[in-house]
Amino acid sequence: MKNLKLFAVSIAILGITFSANAQRKTVKIYPKHGLVVTKIKKPKVITYKSSKYYFADGVWYKNNRRKYIVCAPPVGIVVRNLPRGNKVVKINGRKLYKYKGIWYKKQGRGYIIVNV
């Protein structure tokens, strides 16, 4: 009887542990271009050819009054850090980085957006 109680308690503890770990998993989905949001969490403001772009969590935005519109970044714009979750890909001997359909190439201390 004592062994049965110990077994039941062990199973309960394992169940709680596994359920707690399952809730920590996050899935990030890249929003579609044209989506409008009202707030961005800690965006980096990047000026390129007299236009301001906002870069936050790997997503690019343009400002429209008090709202932000998800957009494709222009080729040639440079960022200091790549978004988390980027993939390293070698194409024709060149090392490129891809994140949600946007291609980056190392340039100096940053990364420039390129066409592939």
Image: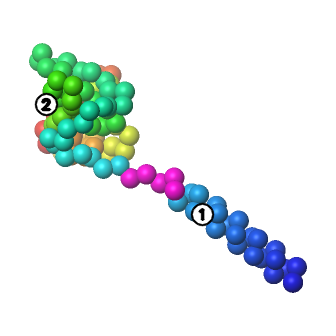
**Circle 2 residues within 10 Å: few <14, some 14–19, many ≥20:** some
Quick check: is 16 in the magenta stretch?
no
* Residue type, label 1: Phe
* Magenta-drawn segment: 23-27
* Residue type, label 2: Pro
Display coloring: rainbow
11 or 48: nearer the eye? Answer: 11
Q: Residue at x 30, y 37 (%)?
A: 58
- Label 1 sits on residue: 18
Labels 1 and 2: the sequence-earlier one: 1
**Circle 1 residues within 10 Å: few <14, some 14–19, many ≥20:** few
Specify whether residue 77 is in view.
no
Q: What separation in Å lies between label 1 and label 2 (alpha carbons)?
A: 44 Å
Which numbered disc covers residue 74? Answer: 2
98 or 92: nearer the eye? Answer: 98
Q: Residue at x 82, y 77 (%)?
A: 5
Q: Quadrant of residue 112?
A: top left
